[in-house]
Every structure is written in C-alpha cells, then in structure tokens.
Image: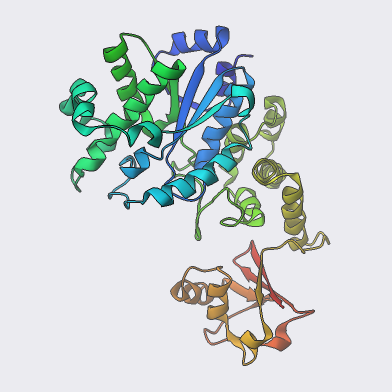
Amino acid sequence: MSVFQTLKERGFIAQLTHEETIKKILENEKITFYIGFDPTADSLHVGHFLQMLVMSHMQKAGHRPIAIIGGGTTMVGDPTGKTDMRRMMTREEIQKNAENFKKQLSRFIDFSDGKALMLDNADWILELKYVDFLREIGVHFSVNRMLTAECFKTRLERGLSFIEFNYMLMQSYDFLKLFQEYNCVMQLGGDDQWSNILGGIDLIRRVEGKEAYGMTFTLLTNSEGVKMGKTEKGAVWLDPDKTPPYDFYQYWRNIDDKDVIKCMKLLTFLPMEEIEKYSKLEGQEINEAKKVLAYEVTKLIHGEEEALKAQNAAEALFGKGVSAADMPTTEITPDEIKNGINIIDLLVKTKLVPSKGEGRRLIQQGGIYVENERIKEFDFTVKADDFKDNELIIKKGKKVYHKVKLV
C-alpha cells in the first residue's frame, strides 16, 4: 500500500492541490516535502503530534522530510486561528523553544545520514533586506486575493496588524527557498494552513515557472468539531514536565466514545485490521479500546516504561489492586501543614484547579473528595493526622486523582 493510501485510509487528508498528480508522485517517486513548526511555546502539543505522525508515515515510505523550525516566522507570528495579535517574542525565547522542538521531533523522525533535515528559517528570513524582499517577492502577491484568505478574513473586523499581514509572504518564501535549494516539491500542514500553502505554490510558479504541491490534513477535533488537546489546566503538551505522563494517559482514557476510533487511526501505528476490531465494540466494551488508545499514544510520546506506569496507576484507582506509586504527586513539608492547610489552598498548590474560585465552584458542586470523603465546606482544613503513611489522596470529579506526600 502506498503512503497516499495509508494517509487517506487513516483519515489524515483534508485538501490536496492536485490529487491525481500527488497520488502518482507518492506512489512512484521519492520526494522531499516539508512541514513548519513555529516555536511559540517551549513544547509541542498533541495538535503537532498528528503532523509528526504524518512525517513519520511519509519517511517510512521513502520520502525525505524537512522540519522547518520557524525561528524567523515566529518573530512575526501567524494570524491563523487567532482573534488577537500574538505576543511579540524575543530571539532568545524563540531559540530556546526551537531546541526543545528539535528533541521532540527526533523521537519520530530519523535525521541521520540526510534521511531528514531540520532547518531554522531564521537563517534566511532574518537576513532579508526589506526593500529587496518587497521587489523580489512582494510584487507577486495580490492584496485583494490575500484579503480573501480565511486567515486574514476572520481578523479584519477586530484588526489585522501590518506585521502579521507579512506572514503569508514569509511562509511562501520558505517554500520557494526549499524548492530552490533542496528540491522540496510539497508542503504539508494542518488544514488551517491551506491559504499559506497556496501562496507558496503560486510564488514558485511565478518565480520558477514550475509546479509544486500542497496537502493539508484534518485538524485534531472531537465529534462536535472542537479542537482536541485542551483541559482545565490548558493544552495537552508532549513535554512530561508540562503534562505528566499519567495526566497525558488519562486525557486519552477519558475522551468521548465517538472519538476513540478516529484517534486510533490518526495517533497510533496500530494496523487498520486491529482498529477495525475495536470499532465493533459497543457500550462498556468501548472502555477497552480507550485503554489501548491511551497506552499506545502515551508509549509513542513518553516511552513504554512511562506508559506502563500510567496504565498501572490508572488501573489501581479502579480497584484492580495495582500499586498507585506512579499517581501524579505533589510533595509538601510537615511545616506547611503544621497548623493545617485549607482545602482550596491545597487544590491550587497541587494544580488540580487553576484558581481559588474554581476550587470553590468544584466544592460547591460536590466534585472534591479527600480520601473518598466528599468535601462540603470551603473552610475544610487538611491536617497531618489525615495522612496515612505520609500520603493523602485527593479526587476531583470521578476520574482525576492526585497524591499529596509529606516529605
């Protein structure tokens, strides 16, 4: 089976610029393609993970990936999907984030012996001379056409800064540069990048008189069309310090029944025949498919050992008798509870809630338990005597558990 069929069968592909041509190219040739990642945060998240798996599928089929770390484009900021202008970042912040991206990408892409390249577009974008860039690149872009692009259209009412208006030109220039220097003939990206990809293809056609291609893949959304990868604590990150492996596992363990099979296809390498068997499960049996999904995705991101730890900890919480040693844990000192600690303060300290207001709301709704006892009062105080073997279990809702440990 060609990689085109693999991507189509698993539900990755959203839009293609030249479907039949791309199908033939991917079946009969070995090409160089690229995907860009702007380092606007210090870690990639689960939305990027889908793109990383596309790169992996493509590389396994013999195609060469280029991962562009957008050190230059991040200085401007992509307006796509944003209602307000992004915060301006320093070169130092961007560089630090880019280093983290490189480590995370290397788990899925083989960069040895030129099998894949990782480039930073700061190397050419920050060297550009503005007037030269306008004369050589800007002349090929129609403002009228740009304003019809979804990424700009949605921002016109609230205000679109001139610096952001340049983003499409810069991303298009990336594609031209890679086409010229690395024979990169295809750009891939999330479906929200369609307008930017078309801009690059058109620029290559105007400057080089040659054809390039684009493919977008479906965004990671749930059955209601809402982007996945968000929790009360924020994004689901690939960095274990930002989203611990147990929390990461639990996110996939608790997704909606309707989204399980789609996520198996997109976010694991499980064979389609196996996924087909899970798709036939109904009712409570779907929980078995969720466990498999959670384990497989956690294993890919954090390794088999961490995936097993998360799985065992989760099983322990549902009465399976396995040690809960790997449950998310917050350590506190005896001095901190010498006179007791208010439950709301403890919830904030453990990061089970982002604010005291959220803590009060959950208590009011009956959603907080200490050692399986529902907390009903805002002024409930946790004391040293409440700890068993220097440990205390807090439960939020039905499925979120957290251990507080005296050290």
The residue closer to the viewer here, 9 or 66, is 66
Quadrant containing the N terminus in the rendered view: top right
Place residue 53 in its image quadrant: top right
Residue 362 lies, with reference to residue 279, above or below; the image says below
Q: Residue at x 77, y 55 (%)?
A: 312
Residue 26, x across and y down, in percent? 54, 13
Camera-nearest residue between 174 and 1: 174
Q: Residue at x 40, y 18 (%)?
A: 179
Q: Is residue 173 above or below residue 361?
A: above
Q: Can residue 382 be seen in this view?
A: no
Which residue occupies the extreme right position in the image?
321
Q: Which of 369 and 388 is in front in this view?
A: 388
Q: In the image, is 90 to the left or to the right of 135?
A: right
- Residue at far left of view: 144
Q: At 72% from the left edge and 54% from the top edge, which residue is drawn?
A: 310
Color encoding of the figure: rainbow
Indicate the position of residue 366 as horizontal and vertical percent values.
56, 74
Q: Position of residue 174 (x, y in %)?
A: 37, 27
| Residue 234 visible from this viewpoint | yes
| Vertical relation: 10 (above or below) 48 | above
- Disc count in the image? 0
Q: Give how far across and how far down residue 370 sits, in percent.
A: 66, 77
Residue at screen point 61% across, 40% down: 260
Quarter of the figure with residue 166: top left
Q: In which quarter of the image is the C terminus?
A: bottom right
Q: Is residue 256 found left or right of 130 in the rendered image?
A: right
